């Protein structure tokens, strides 16, 4: 009878539960990575600006969120079907002297290349910058625009 009670009350995880603390392991991993080359790389990494790519009947439209970036700090090029955006978000004067408790907006250079979904006519591309949104409209090349073909009866 004692053996039956022992088996019923037996907990296979009792030893693990008392010695393993997952939060302590996470803190230890954070300390190791944060002080390594990987941690320094992660702190130096700059997030890329978010991009939307849409397609209409006659053009490809790219919209990029770039708050705090001036148009003169941007460079845009189209080679084949690849659009490349380069730029620099400079710190404001009041940001340089401030003591931060949390900083999520990054400053520095960024570059982003995306492949466009259709063949485009890059010579006719138009870029506008309004309220922190860069909108690039690139007409599709003539052979990428769908054409309606009339079927004649015989």
Image: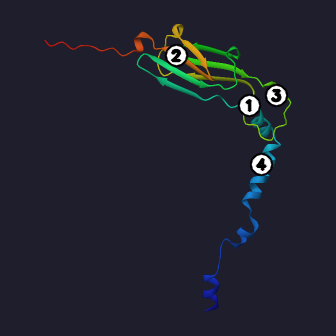
Residue 27, horizontal then vertical, whole percent: 78, 53
Residue 36, horizontal then vertical, whole percent: 81, 41
* Disc 3 secondary structure class: helix
Q: Residue at x 69, y 18 (%)?
A: 70
Q: Mark 1 or mark 2, which is nearer the start of the sequence?
A: 1
Number of labelled discs? 4
Q: What distance separates the C-alpha of mark 3 from that of mark 2?
A: 35 Å
Q: Which residue is mark 4?
A: 30
Q: Quadrant of residue 45?
A: top right
* Disc 4 secondary structure class: helix
Q: What distance separates the C-alpha of mark 1 from that of mark 3?
A: 15 Å
Q: Which of pointers 4 and 2 indicates the residue nearer the eye? A: 2
Q: Is residue 72 left or right of residue 143?
A: right
Q: Is residue 152 visible?
A: yes
Q: Mark 2 or mark 4, which is nearer the start of the sequence?
A: 4
Q: Which residue is mark 2?
A: 137
User: Are the residues at dot 4 and dot 3 in contact (C-beta closer than 8 Å)?
Assistant: no
Q: What distance separates the C-alpha of mark 1 from that of mark 4?
A: 22 Å
Q: Is residue 81 visible?
A: no
Q: Give the numbered dot on residue 106.
A: 1
């Amino acid at each position: 009878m004692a053996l039956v009670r022992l088996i019923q009350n037996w907990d296979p995880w009792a030893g693990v539960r008392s010695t393993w603390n997952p939060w302590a392991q996470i803190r230890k991993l954070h300390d190791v990575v944060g002080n390594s080359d990987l941690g320094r790389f992660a702190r130096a990494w700059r997030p890329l600006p978010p991009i939307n790519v849409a397609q209409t009947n006659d053009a490809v439209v790219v919209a990029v969120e770039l708050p705090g970036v001036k148009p003169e700090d941007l460079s845009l090029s189209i080679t084949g079907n690849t659009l490349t955006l380069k730029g620099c978000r400079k710190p404001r004067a009041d940001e340089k002297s401030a003591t931060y408790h949390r900083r999520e907006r990054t400053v520095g250079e960024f570059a982003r290349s995306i492949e466009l979904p259709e063949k485009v006519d890059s010579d006719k591309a138009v870029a506008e910058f309004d309220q922190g949104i860069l909108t690039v409209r690139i007409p599709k090349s003539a052979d990428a625009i769908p054409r309606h073909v009339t079927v004649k009866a015989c």
